[in-house]
Amino acid sequence: MTTTSPRAGLPVTDERTIDDAAAEDYAQQVRDEGWVVVPDAIDLRLADAIYEDLLRLERDLGIVPADNLFEGLHTTRIYNLLVHGPIYERIPVHPNVLPIVEKVLDPGLLISSLSSIAIGPDESAQPIHSDDQLIPLPKPHPPIICNTMWAITDFTEENGATRLCPGTHLADHSPDPLGSYESIPAEMSKGSVLVWVGSLWHGGGSNRTEARRVGMAMNYCAGYIRQQENQQLGIPVDIARRFPRRLQELCGYSIYNGLIGHIDKEHPGKFVFGADEAAELVWDYARVEDLQ
């Protein structure tokens, strides 16, 4: 797939450079340690195009930092990015990232949220937290959330690289957001992608430089978990209709394990978009005529 940067006019091609074995190796590191950095996962021209377009959105939408310590007093965040242009539609399905996350969760996964996080100078460290601690399940549990952070600029300890507490994805409890914990910075160069399981304790770092640290938070959840951002209401149908089929599935226009997500026994794609797609439901495997 080749498109053009909206600013520089440079061709940007999403090419898969990791094979199935490499994707499995990365996924195994996530299972073992809770996280992994995939170096050089995305084309630097794509990173530059995203950087420039985020500046446009901040200006056009009047985006300013929030008024709470969790989102950050010097951090700008843009949510629901899939409505803001085709360049963002490429992020959830990137061939060097999605296969890893599919192996951590399963191919029935969904987009939970897609947002940008630009940590500005003088920002303090975000409270350490886990992304699944609002879900009432005993811990440890199988992965239900797998998140990724795209390095649109270099991530260093000084400029606010995501801080991680390795191995805490196996803990039997969640962290206290007011607590203090040992952590390490997930330093990575521009174009790299951090992948971590939702139960890993982590938080954005403090920025002690004069430049912004810019990342894309591409977050996924299991197909049976409610998405953090409501994709079906947040993305107008006219926009979702032109998405590639796989992106529509990731937004929730799909059926998980032959049951979860159907609409009156119809496939959501057929019900909403009029697509010629039959629903293969779990009870179809026990049709009377097949049992006689």
Image (cartoon, helix red, strand yellow):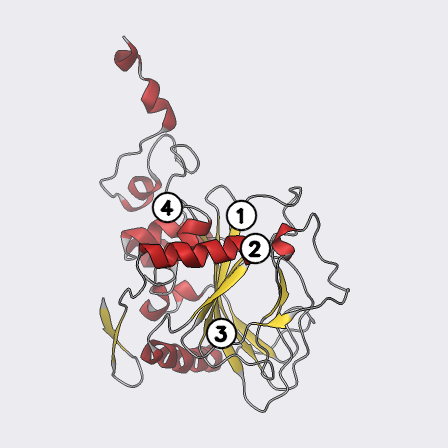
Q: Position of residue 10 (x, y in %)?
A: 25, 82
Instruction: Report the side of 219 relative to 20 (left or right).
Output: right
Give the mark, 3 or 1, whose residue is nearer the N terminus. Answer: 1
Q: Which residue carries the number 1 mark?
A: 143
Q: CA distance from mark 4 to mark 2?
A: 23 Å
Give the mark, 4 or 1, whose residue is nearer the N terminus. Answer: 1
Give the mark, 2 or 1, whose residue is nearer the N terminus. Answer: 1
- How would you rate the neighbour count of disc 3 (Cα within 10 Å): few for under 14, some for 14-19, many for 20 or more? many
- How would you rate the neighbour count of disc 2 (Cα within 10 Å): few for under 14, some for 14-19, many for 20 or more? many
Choose mark 4 or mark 1, whichever is in front: 1
Which quarter of the image is occupied by the C terminus?
Answer: top left
Q: CA distance from mark 4 to mark 3?
A: 27 Å
Q: Quadrant of residue 160?
A: bottom right
Q: Which residue carries the number 3 mark?
A: 215
Query: In the rendered image, is residue 235 in sight?
Result: no
- Helix, strand or loop at label 1? It is loop
Give the mark, 4 or 3, whose residue is nearer the N terminus. Answer: 3
Between residue 93 and residue 202, name the one nearer to us. 202
Q: CA distance from mark 4 to mark 1?
A: 22 Å
- Which amino acid does the dot numbered 3 rest on? Gly
Q: Position of residue 248 (x, y in %)?
A: 34, 51
Q: Position of residue 86 (x, y in %)?
A: 32, 68
Q: Are marks 2 and 1 in contact (CB under 8 Å)?
A: yes
Q: Which residue carries the number 4 mark?
A: 253
From this view, report whether residue 12 is shown above or below residue 143.
Answer: below
Q: CA distance from mark 2 to mark 1?
A: 7 Å
Give the mark, 4 or 2, whose residue is nearer the N terminus. Answer: 2
Between residue 69 and residue 58, name the one nearer to us. 69
Q: Are marks 4 and 1 in contact (CB under 8 Å)?
A: no
- Helix, strand or loop at label 4? It is loop
